[in-house]
Amino acid sequence: MKGLSGPKLLVVHPSSNKTVGGAGSAAMAVLGSRRRMWAVLFLAGFACVSLGTMLCAARDHPAPPVAGRRMAVSVSAEVGGGGEGGGGGGRGGLPGYVFDALVQYAAAAGNSTASMPGPDVRAIAAVLKRRAPCNLLVFGLGGETPLWRALNYGGRTVFLDENQYYVSHLEGRHPGLEAYDVVYTTTVREFPDLLDAARAARSAECRPVQNLLYSDCRLAINDLPNHLYDVAWDIILVDGPRGYTASSPGRMSAIFTAGVLARTRAEHGAETDVLVHDYEREVERACSREFLCEENRVEETSTRSLAHFVVPGGAAARREAFCAAAANAATATTQ
């Protein structure tokens, strides 16, 4: 018992579990992370090699021609709206259901006083559906401008307006819009004198078939970009310029120019659909009868405020007078 009270030797044994376990865990963690990294790199490399192999195989072994033709036909039918009700007659226009939906919503919006009446929208759309995609010339910018451009998808649509600032404004809002400003030198109050002068000169400067660029007829619009006179216009819509006051430019020049552009087309069997809006007004009605002619009017797609004319060009164009009645009167006078 005495020996126990002397100096004591304390021997401390290191905890083999803690020391070895801590070092081992760190080593295992590093090893595991390296293995995962190599695994990721391996899988990434494998994926790249597989993708490259697939691309090379697709390049070296293209689809059979028959499959390619089937795919082309399928895409053409979908884009062109092939089949019943297809807009553009399968020639690359809007699908029929898209065309009809646009017209439906636009016609519903036509109840607003600032928009074209619904029946007129539908009548114009019916003509566009038959001929689009085509060359479409529109006199006047307005609420329906995006609609006409959309319905003629795949064709060329050109707008002419009297207001250069409005032209610039809409070009900014609708990128790719092709529009030009026109300087009109007429007014509605001059309408009777202008009509009499055109009648007197219908075999000279105001004749039905001529190059408008060099025309001396006051009703002729000859300051457009030159290339526009070379276009074979399939449809011309006259919905401008302003014509509701005595000082407004009126649509005498637009209707006369539309009639000449339609008749001057050189293609065999060429026909141009000319649509005149606000036909209930005196100027629009009188000028349309004078330069587009009642014998060319299509009743099925005309309304009270919209007149539809199909004007022949090429060899069928009458050159001595715009309308048959005037031509017959001129012939009787000379005999």
Image (cartoon, rainbow, N blue to C red):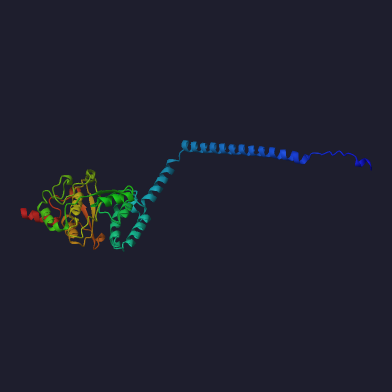
Left/right of residue 200 with respect to residue 313 in the rendered view = left
Q: Report the quarter where the N terminus lies.
A: top right
Left/right of residue 72 with respect to residue 277 in the rendered view = right
**Where in the figure is residue 47, as x and y percent of width and height?**
55, 39
Q: Residue at x 23, y 45 (%)?
A: 225
Depth check, front residue: 69 or 199: 199
Q: Number of labelled discs?
A: 0
Q: Is residue 141 above or below residue 7?
A: below
Depth check, front residue: 62 or 10: 10
**Where in the figure is residue 228, as x and y percent of width and height?**
23, 46
**Where in the figure is residue 19, as x and y percent of width and height?**
75, 39
**Where in the figure is residue 332, as x and y percent of width and height?**
7, 55
Q: Residue at x 38, y 50 (%)?
A: 79
Question: Which residue in the rendered view is the most extreme toward the right?
Answer: 1
Residue 293 quadrant: bottom left
Mark yes or no: residue 234 visible. no
